[in-house]
Amino acid sequence: MAIRSIHDYPLKDQRVLIREDLNVPVKDGQVVNGTRIMAALPTIKLAMSEGARVILMSHLGRPEEGVPIAEQAPFSMAPVAAYLGDLLGQTVEIMPADFSEEASLALPAGSCVLLENVRTNVGEKGNDEKLSRYYASLCDIFVMDAFGAAHRAQASTHGVARFAGKVCAGPLLKSELDALDKALSIPQRPMLAIVGGAKVSSKLEVLRALAGKVDQLIVGGGIANTFLSAAGLPVGKSLIEEDMIGTAKALMAETDIPLPVDVMVAKEFSEGAEATLKAVSDVGENDMILDIGIETSEKLTAIIGGMKTILWNGPMGVFEFEAFSAGTESIAKAIAENAGFSIAGGGETITAIDKYGISEKVSYISTGGGAFLEFVQGETLPAVAILQERG
């Protein structure tokens, strides 16, 4: 892609505004999972080490636009600043809403500050020109490094890049794009996609896009139930989408989609529900399918072992419940043991990777959720498009 890199510009004494995705889970004022902050850290350290005056911005959760952060404190970036400060070994100050161009010029070289939650700013979601120009006034160089927000045309991701003097991609964004390009544009064959989740409809375009690219497609979770029903197999009272049966049949006619042969079922959807292993053909009318079974796990593990490129998005079952986690665990470990190129993305997928301790064995873990899926299905990401235009 014809996009300038942060390495293309001298950073010393420059005001460098970096849009990161620091949208992390926070509980009782403490960051409980800093994966995204850790992913952004190399970019931040790079700019600081070269003597830049670093200004960071990100969203956190879904605060109400135009309402002062003091009135919606759970969405403040303060816990993120504290966590980041610990990693950097220095205080990271939160800049208020009236942070000005003059104030940005007064920052010392090698410093790092963080703007308060951008989604509280009026015009952020609407990609407002006035707000975009304000962001641009704070910097000499704008660095887009938030792949997880690249699918949104907002003031802090897209608008600012229209008006900043110099714009470029950060290392994290560039590595995301390179990894996805390697997996989708020039994959080593055979290629496998694993797509799990609750509903076919939520990942329909992803499934359609992948069906024409991969050699095999594994479906899991509630999505698999719809495919089982499309194949004429009993699913009891499991979650399915009746209006997606035809779509599932069409996808199975186009691509090799191995279906479960045995499953773990329960009579109710609860963590304490009793898990029972059954052949798919024996699923009763009161059963709920909550995971794949032992034979299916072995079958899918063997398929994964023979692949050279693997794209993974979504679990095999309700892995949050321990009794129904074995399927996702077996798939995760099979991917970890595969010697080919693997890329994984999506919130539930990253949670599973953390749970089973395989992060070091997956070739690339995407920090994006919606952006990951939109890229996979061939959508243009607005924040990437503007970088290409300016580049």
Image (cartoon, helix red, strand yellow):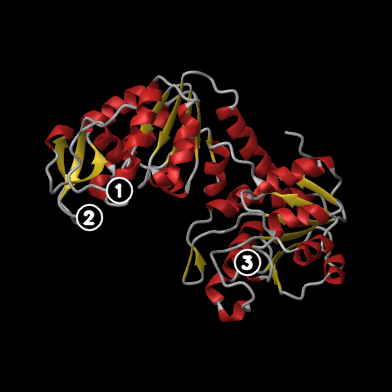
Measured Cα–Cα span from mark 1 to mark 3? 32 Å
Contact? badges 1 and 2 (CB < 8 Å): yes
For residue 183, which quarter of the picture? top right
Q: Measuring from the top left, give residue 27's x and y in whole percent.
A: 46, 68
Regarding mark 3 in the picture, which secondary structure is present there? helix
Under mark 3, the amino acid is Arg
Q: Measuring from the top left, give residue 46's x and y in whole percent.
A: 74, 48
Identify the residue under disc 2: 269
Count of marks, rendered view: 3
In this rendered view, identify the residue nearer to me: 107 or 210: 210
Q: Badge 1: how crowded within 10 Å, few (<14), some, or many (20+)?
A: many
Q: Which mark is residue 119?
A: 3
Contact? badges 1 and 3 (CB < 8 Å): no
Q: Outermost residue toward the bottom?
A: 71
For residue 306, which quarter of the picture? top left
Asked whether the viewer can see residue 121, the reply is yes
Lower position in the chain sequence, tag 1 or tag 2: 2
Position of 385 compared to 327: left or right?
right
Q: Badge 3: how crowded within 10 Å, few (<14), some, or many (20+)?
A: many
Identify the residue under disc 1: 318
In this rendered view, identify the residue nearer to me: 132 or 75: 132
Residue at 48 percent across and 21 percent down: it is 308
